[in-house]
Image: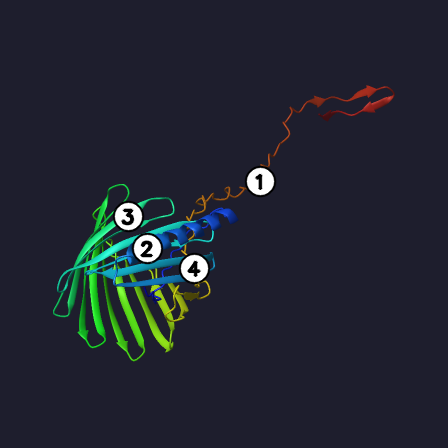
Amino acid sequence: MNTRSFARPTIVAFPAFAATTASVRDALRKLVLAATVAMLALGSASAFAWSQHGTAYTSRGTYNGARYGSCGGGSCSHAGGVAGPYGGFATNTGTVTRNAPGEFSNSGTATGRYGNSVQHAGDTNCAGGTCSHTGTLTGPDGKTASTSGDVTRTAPGQYSSSGSITGSNGNTVDHSASTNCAGASCSRSGTVTGSDGGAVYHSGTATRVAPGVVTTSTSATGTLGNTVTTSGTITTTGVVTTGSTTVVVAPKPVVVAPPVVYVPPPPVVYVPPPPVVYAPPPPPAVYVAPRVVYMTPVPRPVVWIPGHWVGNVWVVAHWS
């Protein structure tokens, strides 16, 4: 049975948690075991099988992933997993079946590192250059979300897509995009609009620069106007027995700090000064001249005193 490398690496990121060497080895053993079981189960009765192994180097550490798939009897199945740098492990399995010309159904299960699983299923119908898809996702709590969308070939190398996702709470997110491929490069741009009207814009390119070497770049602008850009190179080694794909992840994307929210200072309350009460000056001093009182001597009566002796002196008669 021939195995082939698959050019679409899978990268799953996990938040960092306490790491031990033993946990990492245990996760890698799980990954190898799951991949081996999938290879045997899918390849035992298949006419075509493929394998993929990928390594992603990120600022959070190294992630190892493996996927194996098999096709036969109008159906293709795949199984795989990703082991994180701190022992986290996640798996994904699924099947796509061709029911009739242009009609397909799919189902599968994605299981996170804590054991929580999400079931997904859907149907696709292709006719007249358009493929339409509907599906459901059911979480571990039984809540369900629904998806729908379509992809249309508008011209050679040109495609448009649109769709929506409705969560269990009834909120709907709409998305639309267009893709244009010419020569060795494909470019894509699109918009995702939330139930509250907020929109996220994204764009990206993929260019084949050499056999087995593809460069990529992406840009996403959020509802607040912040933009995050990433770039990288994907290199494959071709058809090998074990399959090998190395993903060189670009340096940690530059995260634009959220805009500084201007908080105006509290308004200055004008406190008027207390009113000035006009106190008139005291009335001018009135000069009061001292009163002149003219005193006239009181007249006394005139008495005639006859002449007389005072001692040895004779005093003649006179009025007194």
Q: Earlier in the sequence, mark 2 or mark 3?
A: 2
Please give the name of the residue rendered at 35% of the width and 75% of the height, measured from the top-left corner.
Answer: 207
Q: Which residue is mark 4?
A: 257
Q: Residues within 10 Å of mark 1 (few under 14, many from 20)?
A: few
On screen, residue 12 above or below 187: above
Specify the amino acid type for callout 1. Answer: Ala
Element assignment for label 1: loop
Q: Earlier in the sequence, mark 1 or mark 4?
A: 4
In the drawing, what numbered circle is on residue 40?
2
Please give the name of the residue rendered at 32% of the width and 55% of the height, measured from the top-left corner.
Answer: 40
Residue 250, given in percent of the width and then of the height, sits at 44, 66
Q: Earlier in the sequence, mark 2 or mark 1?
A: 2
Specify the amino acid type for callout 3. Answer: Val
Residue 23, given in percent of the width and then of the height, sits at 48, 47
Q: Which residue is mark 3?
A: 118
* Gap between marks 1 and 3 measured at Cα: 116 Å
